[in-house]
Amino acid sequence: MARGDQQRGEGGQRRDRRDRNAPEERVDSDIVEKLVHINRVAATVKGGRRFSFAALMVVGDQKGRVGFGHGKAREVPEAIRKATEEAKKTMIRVPLRESRTLHHDGAGRWGAGKVMMRAAPPGTGVIAGGPMRAVLETLGVQDVVAKSTGSSNPYNMVRATFEALKVQSSPRQIAAKRGKKVGDILGRRADGASSPEAIEG
């Protein structure tokens, strides 16, 4: 009996490791939810060690809105639910060029996490790894080249990615700040590539 319990315990640990390495994806109406990382944490109390789970979730509508959240609970489903609710409350809007890529290159940093992102032509796909890929896919980016040059900690990587996305600006926003027209901001780029309306995003 004890052996069977031990095998089930080991199987549970294997499932936890598999969840930790491969992001899960769930679709809730228009919101896509991705489990980026799950970790078992232990708190030492008077009677021994109390185990709980910490989950990191990323949610987005794949149309320019994305958010992330962290939740901790005694059970994995409850931790995921808490993280998802927090992620939905903290969603940000990011302007996208032609609804498929970023308007310009950007970099972000959080703690030891450093990331770089570059806009890419059609057909490139999402070239990014781990937590960055989860954020960009739920955001709705289809073509981007991204690289993490700092810590591989998923929490730092996700926060650094959000810092890079927060500084993204569309030509319409820049034109409004400068009091000019979108065509004046784009210049030759609009003439050679696409119309101002398509690039505004």
Image (cartoon, rainbow, N blue to C red):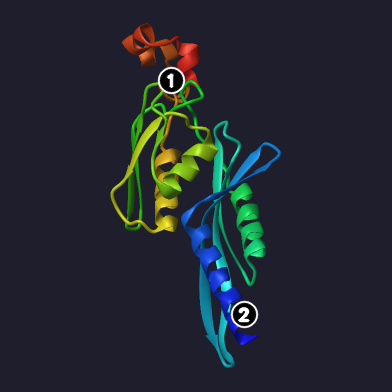
Q: For residue 169, what is the image quadrant?
A: top left
- Please indicate whether residue 50 sits to the left or right of residue 118 in the image: right
Nearer the observer: mark 1 or 2; the answer is: 2
Task: Looking at this view, name the residue that lies furthest to the top.
Answer: 191
Q: Looking at the image, which residue is at 41% across and 23% down?
A: 123
Quarter that holds the N terminus:
bottom right
Residue type at the position of mark 2: Gly
Residue ID for mark 2: 4
Q: Residues within 10 Å of mark 2 (few under 14, many from 20)?
A: few
Which residue occupies the foreground of this view, 134 or 17? Answer: 17
Task: Looking at this view, name the residue that lies furthest to the bottom.
Answer: 46
- Please indicate whether residue 193 sits to the left or right of residue 85 in the image: left
- Please indicate whether residue 122 sits to the left or right of residue 29 in the image: left
Q: Is residue 83 above or below residue 10?
A: above
Where is residue 52? Give x, y as percent: 58, 73
Q: Which numbered disc covers residue 175?
A: 1
Where is residue 88? Give x, y as percent: 63, 48
Q: What element carries label 2?
A: helix
Residue type at the position of mark 1: Ala
Task: Looking at this view, name the residue that lies furthest to the right.
Answer: 29
Q: Is mark 1 on a helix, strand or loop?
A: helix
**Marks 1 and 2: CB-CB under 8 Å?**
no
Question: Would you say residue 181 is visible in this rendering?
Answer: no
